Image (spheres, rainbow, N blue to C red):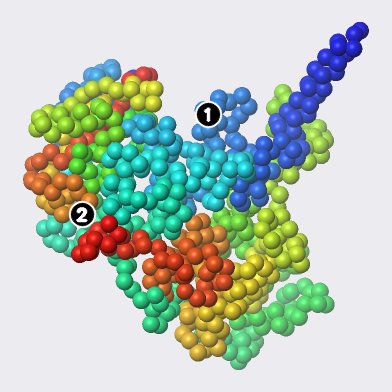
Amino acid sequence: MTRFSTKIKATLAAAAVATGVSAPQAMAEGMEFQTVTDLLHLVMSSDRTVYTRMIVNRLAVQEGVIKASEHFVDDKALVLPAQMFRFGSELVAESTDEFSYSLLSLWPINKQNAPTTDLEKEGLEYIADNPGENFYGEEELGGVTYFTAVYPDVAVAEACYACHNDHKDSPRTDFQAGDVMGGVVIRIPMDS
Amino acid sequence: MTRTRILWIVWVLGTLIVAALFANKLFFAGNRTAVLPGQTAGAHHQIEVSCDTCHTSGPFASAKKIKKDINKTCVTCHKEELAAADDSHPLKKFTNPRMASYWEKVDGRFCTTCHAEHQPEITAEAMVTLQGDFCVACHSEGDQDIRKDRASHADLTFDTCASSGCHNYHDNRALYEDFLVKHAGAPWVAASPVHPTEALAHSYTPVSADQIETYLASIDAPADVVPAPEPAVDLNEITHDWAASSHAAADVNCSGCHAPEAETQAEIDEQWTDIVTEATCATCHKDQMRSFSTGKHGMRRHPKIAKPRSAKDALKFLGVKKPSKELQAEVAKYLNDPTNPGVMTPDEALIHLNPEAAHDSLTCATCHTPHRQDTQRAAVEACTTCHVDDHTAAYFDSPHYDLWQAELAGDLPAGSGVTCATCHMPKSESRDKVVTDHNQTATLRPNEKMIRPVCQACHSLGFAIDALADDALIQNNFSGQPSAHIPSIDWALDRVEPPTQGANQ
């Protein structure tokens, strides 16, 4: 943990300050797992909200100058916000296994984003039933114990819920602005 | 001494000697073919003597590290191809710990889970060493049960997913659902079928005889520059061919290839070589050389293939830290390491090739006439020098060949003809430059890779999918119509426009 903390502490602290949000305070030596995941999530959700509101929603929904499409290469379109988030998490996975994250839902358009572990299911149900709250737990996967945090993923723009309500593969079609549509799951291995 | 005791000593000594010989081969010297644990799969036989290309771990590494290291080497050669394929099951999708329950089924974090090497008995098409119904492992339970998710799939068996012309594990660029819907319903062949990039590449105005003479008169007479050629070489023909080529247009003259480093006449005379190597071609034709080195024709040139083991390293392994040059030379003689065995020759191929070409080596000039700009030869003639299978023989009776002849005769526009290269070495346009893919295997593994860059220029997606799934039609080089229909497009359409009668349900 110490190695991990020192490497990313500065970045996270800077990000927290830059976004002007009262984030959990990083300590001089070592951080609680929950503090780390809270800070990581702050960066993730801020970037994603900026992309969704200022790029996709503005250009594709409000101004209609370009489409956002799952098949962004073939359609010469913008990457969907959920894809942008996933590509980021895959890039992180190529660089480190000291933490991992994914965007999941109980109502996923892409079935591979449905919960695969019991704790994921429990966490997603908890954040859907308790708006505004996060979920934290521990689980063992592949012989390693993880600290797992689940954060609500809220429909921040029309682009989010309109697309999910209209997609032929969507299991739920009554999302509204502000609804919890899924969750961001962040994991940190607890065994050093 | 009893007989038993003697036998015991002989057995122990014999075992030690054999073990020492194997260890010597493995870790120190000589040809290691004898210690191959089983023939390598597919094209890997071309590099199988270069063990260190894939086996990069040091001696006594843990099994976990060895597995990780080996899998890293797969992507040193196949990374670009997988990225271009928009891989449906990339390794990075499986590394997240949430996929741990899947690791026990099919561990998608490692190439070797499905492509185990040195297992010729169980190696199937595309180097797959799992049972053909491997999709069942992850797509048959709970939320992921495809039979519940797609009504059309309810009665399908899992051995048909990848064998039907519907799905591939890696490359589904021409098979994904929305693509099927987007390209449904087109006529099987376009009204005026032309491959646009081929057309672009073929659309150049031939240089006239007068232009050639004028050009040759305007420059230094080549005979004054080129040292006396062999009697068999017709210098006049060579200079005329060259003067009409793109090389002349780009000011690449005789010494540009035959004495590439020379700057003065004296240096040209001194450094002149009649044999121009690939390295010289690759100075300018980098893209072509890179793709050539990833296909079966040129893979032995891939820069990541292990270099021969060096005498210095062997001595270092034995504890000699600063060996003298004499000692290194002696050991090098003994090493005789065949690693990286030069260029491929047809006699080494695992498929039947023309025995008359058995010892031709495969370099740039094998297919390309070096002085004359003759892409026709490289597009068909050169291929048939070695390839004598049914598919190749049937080409000359095929509609694709007739189109090519019509294009050559000027009866059809540029890009109408279909040659071997049209399908197996497709051209692409990037930043106003047409580049030919010199990895002639790329569109074949699997053959649905051919659909987008090649088939769809003239044919409908539905026809292309059906045709590429029909082995007999491939054998007769597409003379006729596909004998079976793959229903993937129909099923995809049913999901967006449900049929009133519930067909396929």
Q: Chain of mark 2?
A: A
| Residue in the image at 72% along x and 83% along y | B236
User: Which amino acid lies under the numbered mark 2 shown in the image of this protein?
Assistant: Lys
Callout 2 secondary element? loop
Whether residue B100 is visible, yes or no, is yes
Callout 1 secondary element? helix
Q: Chain of mark 1?
A: B
| Residue in the image at 90% along x and 12% along y | B3
Whether residue B73 is visible, yes or no, is no
Question: Which residue is at the far right?
Answer: B1
Indicate which disc residue B65 carries: 1
User: Which amino acid lies under the numbered mark 1 shown in the image of this protein?
Assistant: Lys
Depth check, front residue: B372 or B68: B68
Q: 10 Å neighbourhood of mark 1: few (<14), some, or many (≥20)?
A: few
Q: Is residue A61 above or below residue B247?
A: above
**Which of the image's four quarters has the N terminus of chain B?**
top right
Residue A22: which quarter of the image? top left
Residue position for label 2:
A168
Q: How far is mark 1 from mark 2, CA to CA?
A: 44 Å
Residue A146: which quarter of the image? top left
